[in-house]
């Protein structure tokens, strides 16, 4: 089994060295043993594990969810249904955020349409919508 320095791990996974350290502190990857020269040497499975973490983060999973997914991945007898439950909850959250962003886009679109670029900022509908009470201050 190969051993990799933290810099090599970071390059192979496509994340920064500080991110590797952060995930190590968070317990998402085990602290590696040190070589005789004092270098921390990560095994190949740490690279695989960190790739899993990176991809899960890209899909929007939280660190707690990722921790649970990693646990389910190695737990004997764990059911795929448990993984599905976590993914369903994440999907619901993503869909709710998308709905919020659509509402925001709709409101911003109306405000941009209502804004006359030649108007003085004292009468700006965008500024008034953000903080109507500031207008009179």
Image (cartoon, grey):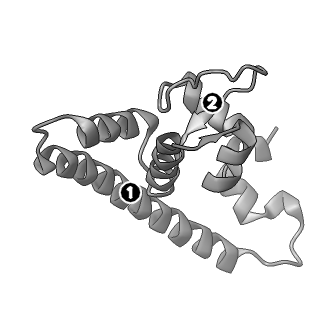
- How dense is the environment of label 1, judged by Cα within 10 Å: few (below 14), some, or many (20 and up)? some
- Label 2: state its secondary structure: helix
Q: Name the residue: 13% across, 39% down.
A: 78
In this picture, residue 92 sits left or right of residue 14? left
Q: Considering only order in the chain, which callout, 1 or 2, is on the residue closer to the N terminus?
A: 2
Residue 95, visible in the rendered structure: yes
**Label annotation for residue 94:** 1
Q: Quadrant of residue 21?
A: top right
Q: Name the residue: 42% across, 63% down.
A: 98
| Whole-percent x, y for residue 26 in the image | 52, 25
| Whole-percent x, y for residue 105 in the image | 55, 69
**Label annotation for residue 8:** none
Q: Name the residue: 85% across, 58% down.
A: 122
In this rendering, which labeled residue sits more in front, label 2 or label 1? 2
| Residue beneath disc 2 | 22
Rendered position, 82 above or below 101:
above
In this picture, residue 49 sits left or right of residue 79? right
Q: Name the residue: 50% across, 26% down.
A: 30
| Whole-percent x, y for residue 54 in the image | 53, 50
């Amino acid at each position: 089994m190969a051993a990799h320095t933290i810099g090599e791990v970071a390059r192979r996974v496509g994340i920064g060295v500080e991110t590797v350290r952060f995930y190590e502190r968070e317990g998402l990857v085990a602290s590696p043993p040190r070589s005789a020269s004092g270098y921390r040497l990560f095994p190949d499975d740490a690279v695989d594990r960190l790739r899993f973490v990176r991809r899960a983060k890209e899909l929007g999973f939280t660190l707690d969810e990722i921790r649970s997914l990693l646990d389910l991945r190695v737990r004997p007898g764990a059911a795929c249904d448990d993984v599905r439950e976590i993914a369903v909850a994440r999907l619901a959250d993503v869909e709710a955020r998308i709905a919020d962003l659509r509402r925001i886009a709709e409101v911003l679109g109306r405000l941009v349409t209502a804004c006359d670029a030649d108007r003085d900022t004292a009468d700006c509908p965008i500024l008034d919508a953000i903080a109507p009470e500031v207008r009179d201050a």
